[in-house]
Image (cartoon, rainbow, N blue to C red):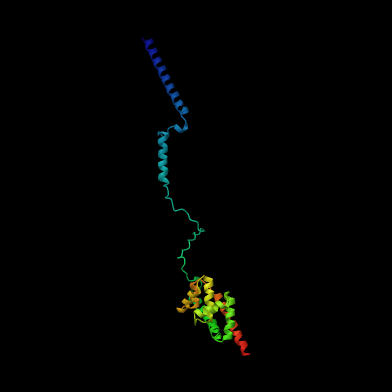
Amino acid sequence: MRKLAALLIVFAFCAAQVEISARADNKDKDKKGVPPGLAKKDGVPPGQAKKQEAQEDVKANPSQPAGPAPTDANATAAPSAPTATQSGTPQPNAASSSPAVIAEQKERIDYQIRIINEGTQRPHVKKMALEQIAKETGLQLSVLQEQEKNHPGIGTSALLLGNLIAKRSNAKFRDVIAEREQGRHWAEIAAWHRVPVPPLIQKSSDVASVVTAVIAANRQ
């Protein structure tokens, strides 16, 4: 009996040692065989651990709202298209619409008109003046005489200014004269037909110089 009891004790001891050794081997396999990415972290599966880290990052660094796109300080706005005007309707010349400019132009034209109209009261002076007006306007002398006949009392200067404005604006001479007969000044008529006034002043000055020269020559 004693021998049997001793054998049972030895058998139980050996079995316990085998079980302890097997457990140790299983732990070593678990440590060596599991990839680093799949190993549990602090007892938490790797997938759940990553979710927890992502949530912690969101709390620590909240996303900023997207601001407005930066603008280029040197960028220039596209030019707007010019406003179309009704075709066939003459518009005033914006460059000559300043009251101060118009007043000066009126004064200079009036001065030349006075010299021409007063000087051409003499037949021989008028003849020379009409010849100069024909050169300035490119019209024949007979055309000027016919215009004067159809519009009596308009003055010799009107033959010059009326034809110049009509020629430059493709208007009719009688329509330009009609505006003049309504009391409009030559500078206003020219501006309305978009005809530059300075050339009109220059040509009026040329005719006035001829009139002055003829009168001066007759006095000698």
Residue toward you, 76 or 182: 182
Q: Position of residue 193 (x, y in %)?
A: 49, 72
Does the rendering let one see residue 206? no
Name the residue furthest right. Answer: 220
Q: Position of residue 61 (x, y in %)?
A: 43, 46
Name the residue furthest bottom. Answer: 220
What residue is drawn where x is 47% and y is 32%? 36
The answer to whether residue 180 is left or right of residue 130 is left
Q: Position of residue 190 (x, y in %)?
A: 50, 74
Name the residue furthest left. Answer: 1
For residue 127, above or below residue 167: below
Question: How many callouts does the rendering have?
Answer: 0
Indicate the quadrant containing the N terminus: top left, top right, bottom left or bottom right.
top left
Indicate the quadrant containing the C terminus: top left, top right, bottom left or bottom right.
bottom right
Does the rendering let one see residue 167? yes
What residue is drawn where x is 38% and y is 13%? 8
For residue 67, above or below residue 25: below
Q: Position of residue 156 (x, y in %)?
A: 53, 81
Residue toward you, 143 or 76: 143
Q: Quadrant of residue 42?
A: top left
Residue toward you, 37 or 3: 37
Residue toward you, 9 or 199: 199
